[in-house]
């Protein structure tokens, strides 16, 4: 693997770092005290600035209006944007839109692309992704109760979904529903586009997460589909291909998440070190003089670097040998980086003491909202189990001396 970064990428990263530092981080105190809708006017202004700088939608193809960066390059960009919770939204590469754009680009019909993809890439509308169900295990996506039954030229969808991120204010949802119940288990479900103003699409609530309900983009919706009728032309890809398409979406998405988490690690680490270097605990002595704090700093620096190299290698493997062959590398980073991020955030909060518990810094926000990293897109335990099973199977017919 070549670790060299092109001059163009270095220039892009420099511009993004400066933008995040000067334009986004100063907005965070306001972001922590206002609703997301109240923040939208200033965020849309920042988005227009990003477009003028030609840094919009870094991970999307040039023909769609993006920068066309590869997975490794976008990983580096995502790391830079992850330093602020506003970064990805302002640069037009936020989840779940980023994954939905990939699905529409790869599997959408010309009509679907014109109606949904073009405005989504341009940031004119938002979308959500409805797969996780209330009563079904999220770690087993082939277990699903939501159904889409054919009726004439339509599907009638019934079911309950939750953690449909950003459903509040989105224009459409990509819904995973069982269309072929008698098919083999991995070919029972399909993906269907459902406009959110469609009768039968009901946003029940924004789910409170660690005491924060959220609104607009910064929310997680519970959605009830009640005899929701949509035309069969809203089907994405082939009927029964929902699981396969979901796996295509989740592989790169996990790398995007991990690089964003590394940005969070870097921000928390910087805040921790600055606090330690300046917090007086006795005349002439700061927290940084304590051996325990020095140990936390050294361990955090090493762990972040190890996680970063693992993620870059996984992104490189995805681009060179494909998702299936790189599935172990993707599972490694999913549980390892999430754990490191949680550890670094916790240390940063501890070093800040009582201040760390407040919203006077961004640390408490990260602590609340990023704990879920060890659950979504496959719980840590599921990834560990899958990787260990494949590793142990490889030893069944081997002789080791």
Image (cartoon, rainbow, N blue to C red):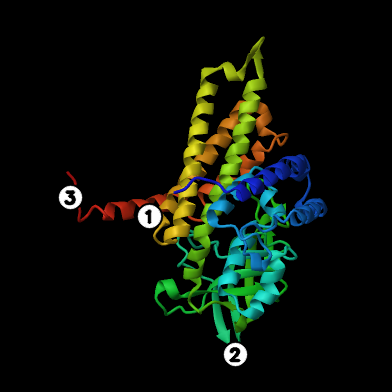
* Cα gap from disc 3 to disc 1, whole angstroms: 23 Å
Q: Out of 166 and 391, give the one closest to the viewer.
A: 391
Secondary structure beneath disc 2?
loop
For marks 3 and 1, give the one nearer the viewer. 3
For marks 1 and 2, give the one nearer the viewer. 1
Q: Residue at x 51, y 66 (%)?
A: 246
Residue 342, by quadrant, is: top right
Name the side, left or right, on which 364 lies relative to 307: right
Give the residue pinned by disc 3: 399
Name the side, left or right, on which 166 lies relative to 297: right
Crowd tier of the residue under label 1, counting other residues whose Cα lies within 10 Å: few below 14, some 14–19, many 20 or above:
few
User: Residue 386, which numbered label?
Assistant: 1
For marks 3 and 2, give the one nearer the viewer. 3
Q: Is residue 332 visible?
A: yes
- Relative to 324, is 259 above or below? above
User: Residue 174, percent across and down?
Assistant: 61, 69
Secondary structure beneath disc 3?
loop
Q: Residue at x 34, y 51 (%)?
A: 388
User: Residue 221, percent across and down?
Assistant: 65, 60
User: Residue 113, percent across and down?
Assistant: 65, 75
Q: Please tell me which of labels 1 and 2 falls first in the chain.
A: 2
Give the residue pinned by disc 2: 152
- Relative to 342, is 123 above or below? below
Residue 108, by quadrant, is: bottom right
């Amino acid at each position: 693997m070549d670790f060299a970064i092109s001059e163009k990428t270095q220039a892009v990263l420099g511009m993004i770092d400066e933008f995040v530092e000067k334009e986004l981080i100063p907005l965070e105190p306001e972001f922590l005290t206002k609703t997301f809708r109240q923040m939208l006017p200033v965020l849309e202004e920042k988005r227009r600035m990003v477009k003028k700088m030609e840094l919009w939608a870094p991970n999307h193809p040039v023909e769609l209006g993006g920068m066309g960066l590869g997975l490794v390059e976008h990983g580096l960009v995502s790391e830079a944007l992850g330093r602020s919770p506003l970064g990805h939204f302002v640069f037009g590469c936020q989840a779940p839109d980023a994954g939905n754009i990939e699905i529409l680009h790869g599997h959408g019909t010309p009509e679907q692309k014109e109606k949904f993809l073009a405005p989504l890439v341009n940031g004119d509308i938002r979308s959500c992704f409805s797969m996780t169900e209330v009563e079904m295990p999220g770690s087993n996506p082939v277990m699903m109760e939501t159904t889409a039954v054919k009726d004439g030229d339509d599907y009638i969808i019934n079911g309950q979904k939750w953690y449909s991120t950003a459903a509040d204010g989105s224009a459409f949802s990509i819904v995973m529903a069982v269309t072929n119940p008698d098919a083999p288990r991995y070919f029972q479900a399909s993906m269907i586009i459902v406009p959110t103003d469609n009768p039968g699409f009901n946003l029940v609530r924004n789910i409170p997460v660690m005491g924060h309900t959220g609104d607009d983009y910064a929310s997680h919706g519970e959605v009830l589909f009640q005899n929701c009728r949509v035309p069969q032309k809203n089907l994405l890809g082939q009927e029964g291909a929902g699981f396969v398409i979901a796996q295509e979406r989740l592989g790169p998405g996990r790398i995007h998440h991990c690089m964003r988490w590394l940005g969070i690690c870097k921000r928390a680490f910087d805040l921790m070190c600055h606090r330690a270097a300046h917090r007086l605990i006795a005349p002439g002595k700061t927290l940084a003089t304590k051996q325990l704090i020095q140990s936390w700093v050294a361990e955090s620096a090493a762990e972040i670097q190890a996680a970063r190299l693992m993620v870059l290698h996984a992104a490189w493997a995805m681009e060179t040998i494909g998702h299936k062959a790189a599935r172990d590398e993707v599972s490694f980073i999913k549980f390892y980086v999430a754990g490191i991020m949680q550890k670094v955030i916790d240390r940063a909060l501890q070093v800040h003491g009582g201040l760390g518990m407040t919203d006077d810094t961004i640390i408490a926000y990260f602590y609340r909202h990023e704990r879920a990293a060890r659950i979504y897109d496959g719980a840590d335990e599921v990834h560990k189990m899958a990787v260990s099973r494949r590793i142990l199977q490889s030893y069944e017919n081997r002789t080791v001396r």
